[in-house]
Image (tube, rainbow, N blue to C red):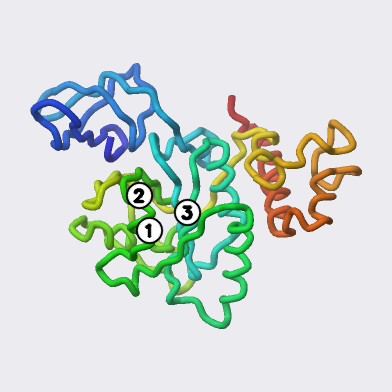
């Protein structure tokens, strides 16, 4: 599946006489929700369309809750998540942490890609270095690039990152995901939007998740930009696991029913006091737990 629309999907044939052909397909009613990156079995239908009759087992699946609490698949069978951030719009560590928690839970490696390095200046240099430093200390790979400075060619760092991999580009709108893809695939018609001058927030440019083949080898999946990544479908234990430095001390609190929200004898607070957990990450952890609790209390808890 290379693109997903409301009722139909674009499927690229991987074998047979139609190898490489893209066919618009309908889906049998007995097949669960499909997503870009899925491997499927299809047969020819009417009027040059096809019908998907089966889905192969997935290696992994990245999904998120929608505004109504229902899980929405983002992409399947991917090698790593590339989380794109930029100096403008200003990156928020809480949003970054939400993506990283999803990465840890699904066991899909995540890479943080700082785009628009040409916009780094004296005003934001220190905060950006501190932000990226926190994640590098935790072992996350951080790559820096500027689609604007590289012109119509991708930077060597980005080429090395995506070569022979199936990558998902995620991140808030306006950080330059589509611009980076254009440098990797200049022949693709990806509309590039601007950051709103009044709000500083990006304008959505991609209306559906799409898979693109790279001339250098590998695939990219470009998904619509989102500004908030909910995790309330997860349990508190999963969120604890999603923070690398926090899962190291889980199970060592003084009381077994510790909620990790300032409770007496909390091992997480102790680790933070000892400098093993940054204040920013601890604040993000507490906020995510609180958001999850509030959303589940409103009846959005999922089975």
Precedes in sequence: disc 3 or disc 1: 3
The N terminus lies in which quarter of the figure? top left
Mark linked to residue 222: 2
Q: Quadrant of residue 29?
A: top left
Q: In this view, does 251 lie above or below 98?
A: above
- In the image, what residue occupies the spot 13% across and 36% down? 21
The reply, left or right, for residue 132 in relation to residue 191 is right
Earlier in the chain: of badge 1 and badge 2, it is: 1
Image position of 258 with respect to 161: above or below = above
Q: Report crowding for label 1: few under 14, some 14 to 19, many 20 or more residues within 10 A (C-alpha).
A: many
Q: In this view, does 223 lie to the left or right of 274?
A: left
Please say if the residues under marks 3 and 1 sit with CB atoms less than 8 Å apart: no
Task: Name the residue carrying label 3.
Answer: 83
| Contact flag, marks 2 and 3 (Cβ < 8 Å) | no
CA neighbours of label 3 inside 10 A, class few (<14), some (14 to 19), many (20+):
many
SS at circle 1: helix
Residue that label 1 marks: 177
Quarter containing the C terminus: top right
Residue 205 appears in view = yes
Within-10-Å neighbours for mark 2: few <14, some 14–19, many 20+: many
Viewer-side residue, 4 vs 169: 169
Image side of residue 217 versus residue 99, left or right: left
Question: Which of labels 2 and 3 is toward the front?
Answer: 3
Instruction: Say what secondary structure mark 2 lies in.
Output: strand
Tell me where residue 170 appears, x and y as whole percent: 44, 51
- Mark 1–mark 2 contact, CB under 8 Å? yes
Q: Label 3 to label 1, Cα distance in Å?
A: 9 Å
Residue 2, position as x, y percentages in the image: 27, 39
């Amino acid at each position: 599946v290379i693109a997903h629309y409301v009722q139909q999907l674009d499927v690229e044939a991987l074998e047979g006489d139609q190898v490489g052909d893209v066919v618009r397909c309908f889906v049998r009613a007995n097949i669960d929700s499909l997503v870009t990156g899925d491997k499927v079995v299809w047969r020819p239908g009417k009027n040059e369309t096809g019908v998907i009759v089966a889905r192969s087992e997935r290696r992994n699946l990245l999904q998120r809750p929608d505004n109504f609490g229902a899980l929405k698949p983002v992409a399947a069978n991917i090698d790593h998540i590339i989380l794109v951030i930029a100096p403008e719009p200003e990156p928020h560590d809480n949003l970054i942490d939400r993506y990283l928690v999803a990465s840890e839970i699904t066991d899909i490696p995540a890479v943080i890609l700082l785009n628009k390095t040409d916009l780094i200046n004296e005003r934001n240099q220190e905060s950006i270095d501190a932000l990226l430093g926190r994640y590098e200390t935790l072992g996350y790979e951080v790559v820096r690039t500027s689609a604007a400075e590289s012109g119509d060619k991708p930077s060597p760092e980005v080429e090395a990152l995506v070569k022979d991999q199936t990558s998902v580009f995620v991140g808030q709108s306006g950080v330059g995901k589509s611009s980076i893809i254009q440098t990797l695939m200049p022949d693709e018609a990806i509309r590039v939007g601007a950051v709103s001058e009044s709000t500083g927030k990006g304008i959505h440019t991609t209306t559906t998740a799409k898979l693109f083949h790279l001339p250098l080898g590998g695939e990219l999946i470009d998904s619509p930009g989102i500004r908030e990544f909910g995790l309330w479908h997860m349990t508190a234990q999963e969120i604890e696991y999603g923070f690398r430095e926090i899962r190291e001390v889980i199970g060592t609190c003084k009381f077994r029913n510790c909620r990790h929200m300032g409770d007496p004898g909390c091992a997480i607070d102790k680790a933070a006091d000892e400098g093993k957990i940054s204040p920013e990450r601890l604040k993000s952890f507490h906020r995510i737990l609180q958001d999850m609790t509030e959303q589940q209390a409103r009846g959005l808890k999922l089975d």
